[in-house]
Each structure stands twice: as structure tokens, then as C-alpha cells.
Image (cartoon, helix red, strand yellow):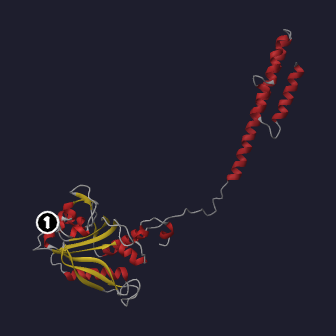
Amino acid sequence: MKEKLLEIKKEALGQISSPDADLEQIRIKYLGKKGELTAVLRGMGALSAEERPVVGQLANEVRASIEEAIAARGAELREKELAEQLCREKIDVTMPGNAPKMGHIHPLTKVQRELENIFIGMGFSIVEGPEVEYDYYNFQALNIPPNHPARDTQDTFYITDNILLRSQTSPVQVRAMEKIKPPIRIISPGRVYRSDAMDATHSPLFHQLEGLVVDKGITMGDLKGMLETFAKSLFGDSTRLRFRPHHFPFTEPSAEVDVSCFVCGGKGCRLCKGEGWMEILGAGMVHPFVLSNCGIDPEVYSGFAFGLGIERITMTRYRIDDIRHLYDNDTRFLEQF
């Protein structure tokens, strides 16, 4: 039996030291419940009383030798595997990194920020207001009572009879005049909503930027001078303005404002449809009724207001022929900007 134990030890240690040793299988083969060493120990009952202690001690020594060899070999293999992994995964920190692909500013946002910077440079402040608005602020305070024809062109989305999605950013001006004492010089950019069918030039959601100036002695000449400064900053120093009479319930007198085509200089081209002019905004002197509604005495103060569509400016600037391109989130289109 001693010879058998020594043979088991020799075989086990030989297999443990082999390059492709499966240590778990070796442990099961020799030390498991049905292993070879266990089988030898089960036969110790046939030994004499003098042989049992000697064989038992030798069996324990063989077991300990095999266990120690398995543990040592396991540690060696793990260390080797770690070294190989570190070699495979090592990083040269001196090499330039792979920069992630970054997006860029949407053309609508780019134009809105440009417009804001122009007006901030002229002393305007940015004021924002709620997109879910009361009928009073969106219509009534702006001299548009119920059943007024002007509501037809600004048909919007009603939540209740008295609450709606704003159809213009003018309610922000009303709220500002209620809270701020003149002099007032603000712009109010933001989203607006109208119940328009989606096509190449219309969308139920679009963006406006409106401006308001209220102070003593404000005249139409102040409005014209401010808009000329704005137009030249946006389209170039050679830009000219043209005012056409119009009607807005909240301004009197009112005007549509055109700029000379920045491509052809007013001679006529495809962009301006041969007219030499492009409409960009509406403007006028704030109606005395609107000032009174906001607690401002129209006998003391006067003001002007103007509003433009950011989509229109963006489409003109980048020669986009379909407003839907601005909302489709098609990267093939957006990557051009």
C-alpha cells in the first residue's frame, strides 16, 4: 500500500507540473470522494494495527503534497495569465486619443443666438414667459377681443376656453409691462403654436423673436433707426429697408418691413423671386390701448414693437426651401451647418 501511495504522489505531481494541467480535474481525480487516494484509504481496514499509523501518516503526507502542489501551480498560472493580460491590454499614454464625434448647434439655435447678440449689443434684455398662456395675455390685452377677425389668422391650440398654447411671444411683452416701469427695452424669443397645416412654409410649431421699447418720446423714427442697425448687423452694411403699411391690432401705425436682397443687392434674383426685396418682420408703434391695459399712461409714454420669425430668417440665411427640414432631425441635412 505504501508503494501505491508513493505512485499516486508521483503521478499527481507530474500531472500538476505539466503545461496544460487542469488543476480542478487533477484534484477530483486524486483527492475527490471517488479519487484514487480516497480509494486507497478505504482499504486501510485490512491492515494490521502496526501498519495503520504508518500508512495513515504517509497518506496524509501525500494528500498535503498534492494540495500544496495544486495551490502553488494555481498561483503560478494566475500570475502568468495576469502578466499576459497586462501585456495585451497595455496602453501607450503618449499616443493621441480618439476624440468622440461631437454634434453642433442646430441652425435655428445658431440664428436665434445671433439675433439675441445683436439686440443685446443695442441694450436690449432677454425676457421669457410661459408657452401655456391665458387668453387675456395672448389676445385681449393686445387689443384682440373675442370674435375679432385677427384671431382667425392666429388660430391656436386651446386647452380650455381660457387657456391655450401661445400663438405669439407678445404675451411676454404684456407681462413685462405689467411688472417693469418704463423705460423698457426687451426682446422675447421662444416657441409659438398655431393650428397650421404642415407644408413647405408652415408649421404648427415655430419660433418668434419679438421686441419692445417703451419710454418717453419714442417715435417711428426710433423704430426705423433701430431696425436699420439690426438689418445691417445681420445682412451686411449695404442692406436697405422698406416699410409697407399694414394693420396689427396691437400697433398703430403698423408696417411690414422688407430688406433688400443680400444676394443680388436689390436687382432681383431667384432667392428674392425677382423682386429685390424680402419680407422679414412686422413692426409698429404700440397701441395706446395696449399701454393702458398694462398700467402705462399713453399720454406720457410711447413705444414701438416688432416681431420676426426665426425660421424665416434661418431659411433665408441658409437658402432652405422647406421648413420641415428644420424639424426632421435628418443628420444628412443638419451636418451641412
Q: Is residue 214 left or right of residue 80?
A: left
- Quadrant where the image shows the N terminus: top right
Residue at image point 85% right, 33% down = 14
> Residue 31 is drawn in which quadrant?
top right
Specify few, some or many for label 1: CA neighbours under 10 Å numbering under 14, 14-19, or 20 or more: some
- Please name whichever residue, 1 or 165, is drawn nearer the observer in this view of the structure: 165
Count of numbered tags: 1
Q: Secondary structure at mark 1?
A: helix
- Please name whichever residue, 54 or 181, is drawn nearer the observer in this view of the structure: 181
> Residue 97 is drawn in which quadrant?
bottom right
Residue found at the very far right of the displayed protein: 3
The answer to whether 261 is drawn above or below residue 174 in the figure is below
> In the rendered image, which residue does mark 1 sit on?
293
- Please name whichever residue, 38 or 325, is drawn nearer the observer in this view of the structure: 325
- Please name whichever residue, 304 or 289, is drawn nearer the observer in this view of the structure: 289
Residue at image point 26% right, 55% down = 159
Residue found at the very far top of the displayed protein: 49
> Residue 12 is drawn in which quadrant?
top right
Expressed as whole percent of the image width and height from the top left, the position of residue 301 reads 14, 73
Residue at image point 86% right, 30% down = 11
The answer to whether 214 is drawn above or below residue 195 in the figure is below
The answer to whether 238 is drawn above or below residue 294 in the figure is below
Q: Is residue 93 left or right of residue 46?
A: left
Expressed as whole percent of the image width and height from the top left, the position of residue 110 reads 40, 70
Residue found at the very far bottom of the displayed protein: 267
Q: Amino acid at mark 1?
A: Asn
Expressed as whole percent of the image width and height from the top left, the position of residue 86 reads 69, 50
Expressed as whole percent of the image width and height from the top left, the position of residue 167 reads 27, 65
